[in-house]
Image (cartoon, grey):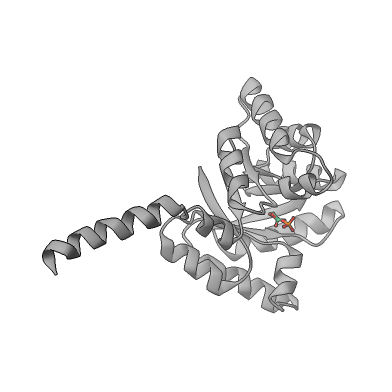
Amino acid sequence: MKFFIDTANLQQIREAQDLGVLDGVTTNPSLMAKEGISGTDRILKHYVDICEIVDGDVSAEVIATDYEGIIREGENLAALHQQIVVKVPMIRDGVKAIRHFSQRGIRTNCTLIFSPGQALLAAKAGATYVSPFIGRLDDVSTSGVNLIEDIRQIYDNYGFETQILAASIRHSMHIIDCAMAGADVATCPLSAILDLLKHPLTDIGLEKFLADYHKVNG
Ligand code: E4P
């Protein structure tokens, strides 16, 4: 299972990279705005800065919602750096654009996936990744993890190579549930990744080991 970090914050990306378990980054317009990154030149430079910190894929989202606009913007983004994956919304023109990109070797992440049918359509169009938003489904009393299980089943039935990128992850249990359900990737806030470290018995056990060592070694 790959771990991506879901942020545009360079410091958090560095921290996750430093931990040695980071496989990529996802961003979206809201995350870029949260960091105060605005204006085309600054946005494009920020994507390059992210690519220089991590070794893996970096999702950069298009703003256009019409076919020609998505193609134009996506091709510009893809040309920025070899690690860029063009993030395209699950809309009619987005699906057409994903087909265009996949035929030209441009990798895509189809975002805002909330149903198995949307995931099937994105895979048919040749998306590299699909991003089911599990936290936002949980927010409206619908199981996000069930969606991951359904997509896994459909992709396995037909051998689709599109990777399931579990998104909108809120906490460490979501990561575990997605791993159990067979997601290929989880894109997470740094806090959810770091929470995987925690167990009180680890702390108690380590304290005891060190105390016993110091009893006889001073
Ligand atoms: C995925 O790529 C999205 O950027 C993200 O996971 C959305 O998460 P949110 O529901 O916490 O905004």
Q: Measuring 63% from the left and 29% from the top, which residue is drawn there?
A: 160
Query: Is 20 placed above or below 166 here?
Result: below
- Report the residue that reaches farthest toward the front: 215
Query: Is 209 placed above or below 175 here?
Result: below
Q: Quadrant of ligand 1?
A: bottom right
Foreground pick, 195 / 10:
195
Left or right: residue 144 versus residue 107 is: right
Using the rendered image of the protein, determine whether residue 53 is visible from the camera's viewpoint. no
Quarter holding residue 210:
bottom left
Left or right: residue 142 versus residue 211 is: right
Foreground pick, 43 / 116:
116
Q: Measuring 80% from the left and 36% from the top, which residue is drawn there?
A: 115
Q: Measuring 79% from the left and 56% from the top, which residue is drawn there?
A: 70
Query: Is 180 placed above or below 91 here?
Result: above
**Image spot of residue 49 (x, y percent):** 55, 72
Query: Is 213 placed above or below 123 here?
Result: below
Foreground pick, 25 / 190:
190
**Image spot of residue 17 (x, y percent):** 46, 63
Left or right: residue 53 versus residue 208 is: right
Using the rendered image of the protein, determine whether residue 177 is visible from the camera's viewpoint. yes
